[in-house]
Structures are given as structure tokens and as C-alpha cells.
């Protein structure tokens, strides 16, 4: 997503650099599945395991408490008109501080329809395609997959572009300010998410 917005912003500026104000105009950005996957990992999968790597998210409990449910290794792909997220699920369910009970490892999968939300790339219509078939674990997983996960995938494109434009004076000699940005539509097309938007940039 970062590289797509970077290419987008500097393409607009280079085309109309000496106009002072770059008028709002329709632009098409293409976002890959790996870009969405990196965003999801950075925003949600940032809790440490025993090896110290920040690559998991605890839904319930943690290793110190004995019983826990966590997910790791998220994978984002596209299928037809949907964004599909697959995660590995690990759980130790039981009773007591030592958590006497069962241990489970499985994959869970949920998919969404991408949706433009003003300045943000959002997701709706969560559809859980695969759970663990363990009733207790599924009750924990379902709200995480259908609510929290899509919320954490949401990307504010305007904030991202403004962050990138801060570096513009170093490379162009001009100060660039994003004055407006609105996402209109997004559609999964093959192996990319095509985002249609209007953007205007002030050049000083």
C-alpha cells in the first residue's frame, strides 16, 4: 500500500508541478495482496512469542497464564471479489494455572468485500469460511475474525500519503501538501485491488 500511494502522489505532482495547486482528479491505484498482508502484520500481529519475535496476536490469555488462544502467520489473498485472510490458530484450553486440558492447532479463514470509506480502505461483509470445529474455540475466534481483524486491516490512505509527502522537499525541492483525498470505489481484479480515488495536492 505504501509503494502504491508513493507512486500515486509523485505521478500527480510531476504531471502538474508548476500549477501551484494540483486540482482534484481521478486516479487509479493498484494494491497487491502482499501489501495488505504487511499492513495487517504491522498493525495486529505485534506480540512476542517465547523466541521474542513480534509475530503473533493473543485473542485470549497468554503463555504466562497457562490457557491461551493466539493466531499467527497471516496470509492475504484475493478470490473472486473478496479479500481472503487465513491465519494459523493455536490454543490451550482447560482449567487451572497449568491449564490442564487440550491443545489445538488449526487454520482459520475469513473473507471480506473491500469498501471505500471516505479517506480509508475498509472492509465489510465478513464471511467466515473455516473455523476449528471446536465449539469453545470457535466462540472465541468468531468475533475476532469478523470484527477486530477487518478493523485492523483498515488503511487511512490520506494519512499515509501525507506521511510520504513530508519527504518531498528532499527529493523534489518543493513542499507538497495533500489538500483533499476521497476514495470512490475498490474492486478485486485478478491479483490486485484496484482503488479509484480523487486527490488534490498543493505545491509550494
Image (cartoon, helix red, strand yellow):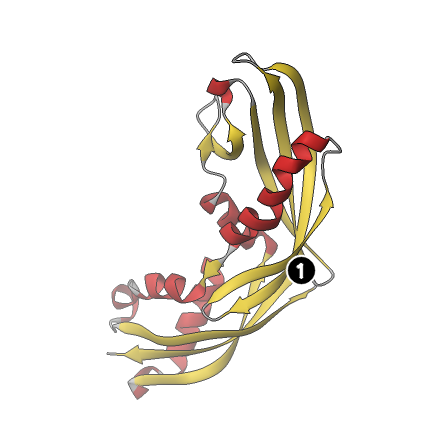
- 123 left or right of 131 in image: left
Seen at 29% across and 70% down, the residue is: 172
Question: 132 or 49, which is in the foreground?
Answer: 132
What's the residue at 72%, 32% (across, down)?
A: 135
What residue sits right under mark 1 in the picture? 191
Q: Is residue 201 above or below residue 44?
A: below
Q: Where is residue 32 drawn, in percent x and y?
A: 58, 58
Residue at image coords 26%, 64%: 170
How many C-alpha atoms fall within 10 Å of the one at disc 1: few (<14), some, or many (≥20)?
some
Locate residue 144 relative to residue 198 in the image: left or right: right
Position of the C terminus by quadrant: bottom left
Instruction: List x then y, in percent, for residue 173.
Output: 24, 71
The residue closer to the viewer here, 166 or 87, is: 87
Q: How many marks?
A: 1
Residue 163, picture quadrant? bottom left
Q: Secondary structure at mark 1?
A: loop
Query: Whole-percent x and y of residue 54?
Result: 45, 33
* Residue at 62% over, 18% down: 94
- Front residue of 31 and 66: 66
Quarter of image, res 158? bottom left
Q: In the displayed structure, would residue 29 be above or below residue 86?
A: below
Task: Name the foreground residue: 6 vs 64.
Answer: 64
Residue 102 picture location, percent across and down: 67, 18
Amino acid at each position: 500500500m505504501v509503494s502504491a500511494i508513493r507512486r500515486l502522489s509523485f505521478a500527480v505532482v510531476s504531471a502538474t508541478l508548476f500549477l501551484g495547486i494540483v486540482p482534484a482528479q481521478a486516479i487509479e491505484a493498484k494494491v497487491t495482496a502482499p501489501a495488505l498482508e504487511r499492513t495487517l502484520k504491522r498493525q495486529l500481529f505485534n506480540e512476542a512469542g517465547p523466541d521474542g519475535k513480534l509475530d503473533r496476536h493473543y485473542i485470549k490469555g497468554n503463555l504466562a497464564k497457562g490457557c491461551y488462544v493466539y493466531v499467527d502467520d497471516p496470509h492475504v489473498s484475493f478470490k473472486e471479489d473478496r479479500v481472503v485472510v487465513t491465519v494459523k490458530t493455536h490454543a490451550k484450553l482447560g482449567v487451572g494455572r497449568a491449564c490442564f486440558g487440550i491443545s489445538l492447532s488449526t487454520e482459520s479463514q475469513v473473507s471480506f468485500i473491500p469498501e471505500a470509506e471516505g479517506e480509508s480502505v475498509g472492509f465489510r461483509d465478513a464471511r467466515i469460511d473455516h473455523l476449528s470445529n471446536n465449539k469453545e474455540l470457535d466462540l472465541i475466534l468468531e468475533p475476532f475474525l469478523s470484527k477486530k481483524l477487518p478493523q485492523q486491516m483498515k488503511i487511512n490512505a490520506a494519512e499515509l500519503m501525507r506521511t510520504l509527502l513530508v519527504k518531498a522537499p528532499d527529493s523534489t525541492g518543493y513542499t507538497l501538501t495533500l489538500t483533499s483525498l476521497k476514495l470512490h470505489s475498490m474492486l478485486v481484479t485478478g491479483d490486485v485491488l484496484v482503488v479509484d480515488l480523487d486527490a488534490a495536492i498543493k505545491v509550494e
